[in-house]
Amino acid sequence: MAMDDMMMDDDMAMADDMMMDDDMAMDDDMMMDDDMAMADDMMMDDDMAMDDMMMDDDMAMGDDMMMDDMMMMAPPRICTDLPAHVAVYGDAMSVNCRDVGAAGIGVMSIIDAGVISAIDIWSTMAVDVEVCFSIAGPITVLDASTAPRMAMMPDAYMSNNLHCVHLTSAATVVLGMG
């Protein structure tokens, strides 16, 4: 019986070892699967973070390029000796500007309505400028190509919080009260 007990004990021990080996193998496989899944998740997170960084860099580069394009496209400010509420922008270096005030307008109906500024713009070459005011009011253009100067109400627009008109010929730009 002792021999049978020993064989039984050996069989049981062998079965326990095999079960233990199976359990350990299963645990190792599950741990390995968990480790691989965790590694995959970390890699995926890293990839997504890298994609986000690349997208942020691309967007920033795009913003910088757009900003550079805008800076290159914006014409320089000219006629810097005008009142602070007036800005004239253009490419032509031959454009001349001067503040003529109400006395330089010559049209009584405009003078009587009230004048904040009157800026005379002229050039020896073609004029292509933007005249802007930081003060709101009606803008009238007195075209210098006609005599007497004909008053026109141009299509004014907002640009960088300024009230602006675009000129393609010599004129006096009047900012009225109103």
Image (cartoon, helix red, strand yellow):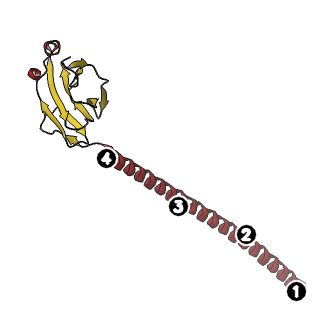
Quarter of the figure that contains the C terminus: top left
- Where residue 136 appears, as percent x and y from the top left, is 23, 24
Quarter of the figure that contains the N terminus: bottom right
**Mark 2 residue type:** Met
**Residue 99 is drawn in which quadrant?**
top left
Looking at the rendered structure, the secondary structure element under dot 2 is helix
- Where residue 56 appears, as percent x and y from the top left, is 44, 53
The residue positioned 26% from the left and 19% from the top of the image is: 152
The residue positioned 23% from the left and 32% from the top of the image is: 131
Q: How far apart are the alpha carbons under marks 1 and 4?
A: 100 Å
**12 on left or right of 88:** right
Q: Which mark is residue 129?
A: none
**Mark 1 residue type:** Ala
Looking at the rendered structure, the secondary structure element under dot 3 is helix
Q: How far apart are the alpha carbons under marks 1 and 3?
A: 63 Å
**Mark 3 residue type:** Asp
The residue positioned 39% from the left and 51% from the top of the image is: 65
Q: Residues within 10 Å of mark 1 (few under 14, many from 20)?
A: few
For residue 9, above or below residue 29: below
**Mark 4 residue type:** Met
Q: Residue furthest bottom?
A: 3
For residue 97, above or below residue 116: below
Q: How far apart are the alpha carbons under marks 2 and 4?
A: 66 Å
Looking at the rendered structure, the secondary structure element under dot 1 is helix
Q: Which residue is mark 3?
A: 46
Question: In this rendering, which labeled residue sits more in front, label 2 or label 4?
Answer: 4
**Residue 173 is drawn in which quadrant?**
top left
User: Closer to the N terminus: mark 3 or mark 2?
Assistant: 2
Q: Which residue is mark 4?
A: 71
Q: Which residue is mark 2?
A: 26
User: Closer to the N terminus: mark 1 or mark 3?
Assistant: 1
Q: Which residue is mark 1?
A: 2
